[in-house]
Amino acid sequence: MRRSAKVERKTKETDIEVELVLDGEGNYDLSTPIPFLNHMFSLLAKHGFFDLRVRAEGDVQVDFHHTVEDLGIVLGEAFRQALGDKRGIRRFGTATVPMDESLATVSVDLSGRPYLHYQSPILQGKIGDLEVGLIKEFLRALTNHLQATVHVQLWHGEDPHHGVEAIFKALARALDEASRREERSGEIPSTKGAL
C-alpha cells in the first residue's frame, strides 16, 4: 500500500498544496515565495527519502509568518495522513547531523501527542529575508499537525544557515527512521493498541 497524501489549505493569507510520498526516493518539486524554505524542504525530501511537492503563495509582502506557519500546518497534516493508523511503523527516530561547525539532534515520537521542545539559543537574526525565529514557528505547526513529539537540540554553531540546515537534515533522518516500516511487527507500536 502506497503511503502518500495530498493536502491543500487556502485562507485569505495563504494558498498551499503539498503532495507527499513517505516511501519515496528523495525527489522534490518546490515552489514557495521563500527561497530559503525551498532549500530546507529539498533537504527534508532528499535526506528523508520522501517525495515532496510543495506549491505555496502567501502574503509575504506583510511578512513571512503566515506562510511559514501554514506550510508547517499543511506539511504536518500530509505526514499524519500518509502515516494512516501507523500500523507497523517504528514510531521512534533520532538523528544527529553535523553541518560544518553546527551540530543538531532531532528525536521524533509519532505518538499522537503533539509536543515541541526546541533548544537553539544560538540561532538569531535573519537568513536572507527570513527571521530565524520563524523556524521554531514552522516546527511547532508541523509538530502540532503531525501530532508527534519532537525534540530539537542545536548543540553548537555560529552560522544560522548551517544551524538550520543541520536541524532540517536531522529532522529528515529522524522522520524517515520513525515512519519506516518495522518488519518484525505489523502491529500498532503501542501497548495501548492505538496512537
Image (cartoon, grey):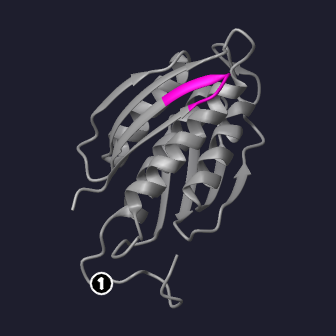
Label 1 sits on what residue type?
Ser
From which residue to which does the magenta span run?
10-16
Neighbour class for label 1 at 10 Å: few (<14), some, many (≥20)?
Answer: few
Q: What residue is at 53 percent from the left and 48 percent from the top?
A: 76
- Residue at 75% x, 13% y is 62
Q: Secondary structure at mark 1?
A: loop
Q: Is residue 178 above or below residue 118?
A: below
* Residue 91 highlighted magenta (yes or no): no
Q: Is residue 12 magenta?
A: yes
Residue 177 relative to residue 110: left or right: left
Determine whether, in the image, residue 175 is placed left or right of residue 143: left
**Which residue corresponds to mark 1?**
185
Q: Position of residue 50 (x, y in %)?
A: 33, 45
Q: How many marks?
A: 1
What percent of the width, then of the height, locates residue 53?
36, 32
Q: Quadrant of residue 26?
A: top left
On the image, the x and y values in percent for residue 55 come to 44, 24
